[in-house]
Image: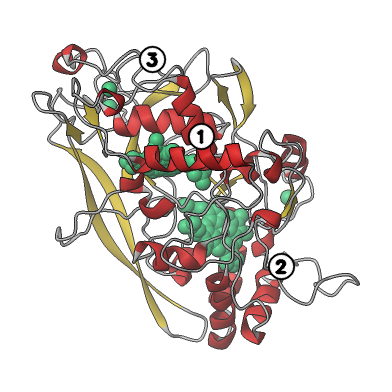
Amino acid sequence: MAAATACGPGRPAGPAPDLGGETTRGDATLNAFGFPAPKLTNEERRLFERGDSLFTRNWVTAPASTDARDGLGPTFNAQSCSSCHLRDGRGAPPDPAGEAARLGLLARLSVTGADPVTGGPVPDPNYGGQLQDRAVLGVEPEGALEIDYETIEGAYGDGSAYELVAPTYRVVNPAFGPLAPDVMIGPRLAPQIVGMGLLEAIPAEDILAAADPDDADGDGISGRANMVWDARAGETALGRFGWKANVATVEQQTAGAFHGDIGITSGLHPDQNCPPPQTACSQAPGGGRPELPDTRLGTVTLYTKTLAVPAMRGGDDADVRAGWELFEQIGCTSCHTPTHRTGDADIAALARQTIHPYTDLLLHDMGEALADGRPDFAASGREWRTPPLWGLGLIEVVNGARFLLHDGRARTLEEAILWHGGEGEPAREAFRLLPADDRRKLVAFLEAL
Ligand SMILES: [Ca+2]
Ligand SMILES: [Ca+2]
Ligand SMILES: [Ca+2]
């Protein structure tokens, strides 16, 4: 699987540092993911600040005297967006030792089949499309997610050993009877959310043009688009967001998070999230109809779209440059496409930018070991969207730890690569067989992102 040779004329000597085009920010501190994109209008800046406060707000049980922030639950996973996306960053799976209270891993649920209208997953009849493990007073949480770990041993080409930790998931203490016999559990970790509006502004035709569903060019990489239900447009659209690219727009990702994760209704999800057998849930008081007016949904959406991408650090460093070359030579760029150009955007600062997210936004079969076995629209149980790699090196700075891949199972960058299977297997093998010094350089490049 030969990657294109690197030394064409016009190939720059090193990686471009301005990962988010002109909206890039050169801050590498604790707050590196939390800045507004430069060049927003004054009005957009004002909305960004309001969106920021809605993002960090803790919602409370209705009815409350503070009626602008009640409506939590009745069942929920967290009280605010920032509980999972702490400082706009990444969540963490539960601590196996049970010591630290860590938020950000949730479980999607579905049963066999597809919704006849949307083509999306069919929820569990008693538990819905997501397991909410918390609830307001007087309402029972749906259950809890339990994780079992198994150690897998392996070795690099040079003989040095490594260990991966493979999680399996089950629901314990189900409050409303057993889950459906064919229930599928899809674990998902909260990713950092910089650059969302830029990803949304990449023209769909550019993403679709890179898809190669039947691997017509025979390079072993298929790249399929997820076509999902766009509830705002009432039609099928290209999915871009989430680990399976199952959501078409930032607005719908935001409204879905309010509803599924916090229990806040909006115009897009007007009804409380209470599957039929959960009567205490459906009888619990709400915080208004909807609990989040459209203007506020718009404010949080703007905030989420305009979080600036941090600049690369140390792009001139010799190791980082060598790692960047290796990243292409061993085939990482077949999926982690370095560069895109945004088209028009409702937020002018995000339009017509040359960006470097290192993703094709397409689905790839990543093999059985990473599979969750849970289809999501066109995505199979083995397929995942190539995640953007921008911000990768700052997750630890912002969040104090770094858990990688869709469920956070990888504890280091090396582990994240070693988990690549399926279409990613040749690149993984190339990495595994690299001399230790080259592996170090590749990782130095990833750390600089
Ligand atoms: Ca509610
Ligand atoms: Ca549920
Ligand atoms: Ca191909």
- Determine which residue is flagged by label 1: 301
- Determine which residue is flagged by label 2: 16
Q: Is residue 24 visible?
A: yes
Label 3: which secondary element: loop
- Look at the image and tell me in which quarter the N terminus lies: bottom right
The amino acid pointed to by label 3 is Pro
Residue 234 lies in what quarter of the image?
A: top right
Mark-to-mark CA distance, 3 and 2? 44 Å
Which residue does the image show at 31% across and 30% down from the upper left?
Answer: 183
Label 1: which secondary element: helix
Earlier-in-chain disc, 1 versus 3: 3
The amino acid pointed to by label 2 is Ala
Which of 290/255 is in front?
290
Mark-to-mark CA distance, 1 and 3? 17 Å
Image position, residue 284 (x, y; %): 17, 16
Which residue does the image show at 73% across and 44% down from the upper left?
Answer: 342
Count neighbours of disc 3 (C-alpha within 10 A) and say few if under 14, some if 14 to 19, many if 20 or more: some
Which of 86/95 is in front?
86
Q: Is residue 246 visible?
A: no
Earlier-in-chain disc, 3 versus 2: 2
Q: Are marks 1 and 2 in contact (CB under 8 Å)?
A: no
Mark-to-mark CA distance, 1 and 2? 28 Å
- Determine which residue is flagged by label 3: 270
The amino acid pointed to by label 1 is Thr
